[in-house]
Image (tube, rainbow, N blue to C red):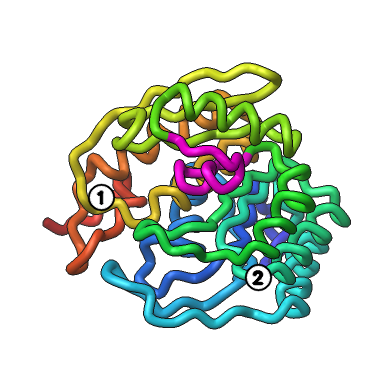
């Protein structure tokens, strides 16, 4: 192809991924973390913003949701032009936004969908009402290649208390069977150290992680699910995508970035030499 000067230009393609989530003004989670993660993992990142949040490492001060109509327009614009090789969903804070997301993903026959069911905050506060959770389970989960709940979210989805690794296995099996999707149940240090359980096709395997003593963990869930989506976009199998995503997350934590007065962000760009101390 010739450029504006008449010279031949070699253009290249790159795999693409779309994040459908909320914006984090402090940059450590949400859309910002997703885009950083996707780019760091070698794919072109696109976004459909579901909400604006005023937040930092200490608190969420305010949330402003987009309208369902606007979210639909965002998704139409992305899918009509640069069709994503993978999709990650994060914060969908109302039943209407969940419905629009599920409808558009179904309409466009989106592939490699990773659903991070952002339902409960780190502090334990419910972020979704019962109606929104119901719509997510009924309309979004069946479209997913993978759902990535943490322990509190898995307790809501399974209706079971999770206190042991055996409880994790039982809950993952139930969620996978009920909603016809693969599940990555994130253990966390409280139950399974840094190990997660990948359950699919009627059986589970433990994906071991490295325990890293770093209190700055803002956005770990967003980062993991986005890295998995990036792997799927590049053609990795599900287990391979999960393993490479966990390795990336560990490296981002191991970089020991220290910003903010609360639980700070990870270093998503640890491989980039800033040239600064």
Pointer 2 local density, CA inside 10 Å: few below 14, some 14–19, many at least 20: many
x and y percent of residue 259 in the render?
20, 63
Quadrant assignment, res 171: top right
Q: Considering depth in this image, is 160 or 271 the residue closer to the camera?
A: 160
Residue visible at 82% across and 63% down in the picture: 80
Q: Secondary structure at mark 1?
A: loop
The answer for how far apart the CA atoms under marks 1 and 2 are is 40 Å
**Is residue 10 inside the magenta stretch?**
no
Q: Nearer the viewer, mark 1 or mark 2?
A: 2
Q: Considering depth in this image, is 269 or 186 the residue closer to the camera?
A: 186
Q: Considering depth in this image, is 76 or 272 the residue closer to the camera?
A: 76
x and y percent of residue 82 in the render?
74, 58
Quadrant assignment, res 189: top left
Q: Identify the magenta region.
A: 147-162
Establish if 260 lies above or below 116: below
Residue visible at 43% across and 63% down in the picture: 125
Establish if 27 lies above or below 163: below
As drawn, the label of residue 273 is 1
Q: Secondary structure at mark 2?
A: loop
Q: In the drawing, does residue 15 fall left or right of residue 165?
A: right
């Amino acid at each position: 192809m010739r450029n504006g000067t008449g010279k031949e230009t070699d253009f290249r393609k790159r795999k693409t991924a779309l994040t459908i989530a909320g914006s984090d003004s402090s940059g450590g989670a949400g859309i910002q973390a997703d885009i950083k993660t996707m780019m760091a993992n070698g794919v072109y990142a696109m976004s459909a913003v579901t909400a604006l949040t005023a937040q930092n490492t200490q608190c969420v001060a305010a949330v402003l949701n987009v309208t369902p109509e606007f979210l639909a327009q965002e998704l139409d614009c992305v899918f009509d032009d640069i069709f994503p090789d993978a999709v990650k969903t994060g914060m969908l804070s109302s039943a209407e936004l969940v419905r629009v997301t599920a409808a558009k993903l179904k309409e466009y026959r989106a592939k490699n969908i990773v659903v991070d069911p952002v339902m409960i905050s780190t502090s334990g506060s419910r972020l979704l009402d019962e109606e929104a959770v119901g719509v997510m389970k009924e309309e979004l989960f069946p479209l997913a290649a993978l759902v990535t709940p943490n322990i509190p979210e898995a307790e809501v989805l399974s209706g079971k208390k999770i206190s042991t690794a055996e409880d994790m296995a039982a809950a993952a099996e139930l969620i996978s069977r009920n909603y016809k999707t693969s599940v990555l149940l994130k253990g966390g240090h409280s139950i399974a150290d840094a190990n997660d359980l990948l359950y699919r096709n009627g059986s589970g395997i433990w994906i071991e992680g490295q325990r890293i003593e770093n209190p700055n963990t803002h956005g770990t869930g967003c980062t993991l699910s986005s890295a998995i989506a990036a792997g799927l976009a590049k053609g990795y199998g599900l287990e391979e995508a999960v393993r490479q995503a966990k390795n990336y997350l560990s490296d981002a934590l191991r970089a020991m970035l220290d910003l903010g007065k609360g639980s700070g962000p990870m270093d998503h760009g640890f491989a980039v030499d800033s040239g600064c101390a």
